[in-house]
Amino acid sequence: MEQDSHLIVDRETGDCIGELNPGDRIIRKKIIDELPDDPGKMPFSNGEWGKTYNSSLNKLARLNLTAAEYKTILLFLTLVRFGSGLVAYGNYKPVNIEWLEAELNMSNKTTCRTLQKLLGHRIIAQSYSGGERIYFFNPYIYQKGRYINKTLFEMFKKSEWAKELRK
């Protein structure tokens, strides 16, 4: 044991459970509980957040989308999963048409038309898993995490959103 270190002792047993060395610091449990899973990242706020590009927001604003389409986009932004871009709620349950209808109080016709328009603009992409439709949000508009996975990159790399960012 180094001379400058300090022992950490369990009050109940008297056992040495560790030591503090120069440069070490004590962090309260409350702070540790609020830290993200990756210890190299410090939280910016108490809520989840992602990143978007100003040029993409500008383009979104000029698309003349309907209120239902903007409502769907805003809801999807809150449901984008870290790194994968999957649009899911709860415990990673992919968003489906029925859930979206109920959540935004829209008819089936409006919901289907809204999703088709967002797919057409490449704001979202659709895939299938286990026979069910799943949706992914375009990471060139909005993403959570520093990197995206290869599958998500392949889905959107040829979209106008990607081309605009590469200019």
Image (cartoon, rainbow, N blue to C red):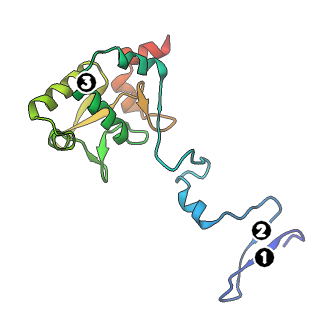
Examine the rendering and report whether any part of residue 158 can be seen: no
The residue identified by callout 1 is 7
Q: Amino acid at mark 1?
A: Leu
Q: Contact (CB < 8 A) between labels 2 and 1?
A: yes
| Residue 16 sits in quarter | bottom right
As measured in the structure, the alpha-carbon distance from the residue carrying label 2 to the one carrying label 1 is 6 Å
Residue 117, image x, y percentages: 21, 21
Badge 2: few (under 14), some or many (20 or more) residues near its Cα, within 10 Å? Answer: some
Q: Amino acid at mark 2?
A: Leu
Helix, strand or loop status at disc 3: helix
Foreground disc of the pair 3, 1: 3
In the shown orientation, is residue 26 left or right of residue 121?
right
Depth order, front residue of 34/67: 67
| Above or below: residue 13 compared with residue 159 | below
Badge 3: few (under 14), some or many (20 or more) residues near its Cα, within 10 Å? Answer: some
| Above or below: residue 25 compared with residue 104 | below
- Mark closer to the chain start, 3 or 2: 2
Examine the rendering and report whether any part of residue 141 can be seen: yes
Please give the name of the residue rendered at 35% of the width and 14% of the height, measured from the top-left corner. Answer: 62
As measured in the structure, the alpha-carbon distance from the residue carrying label 3 to the one carrying label 2 is 55 Å
User: Residue 20 has which mark?
Assistant: 2
Residue 3, image x, y percentages: 90, 71
Residue 10, image x, y percentages: 68, 82
Residue 119, image x, y percentages: 24, 24
Q: Quadrant of the N terminus?
A: bottom right
- Mark closer to the chain start, 2 or 1: 1
The residue identified by callout 3 is 118
In the shown orientation, is residue 78 left or right of residue 21?
left
| Above or below: residue 3 compared with residue 97 | below
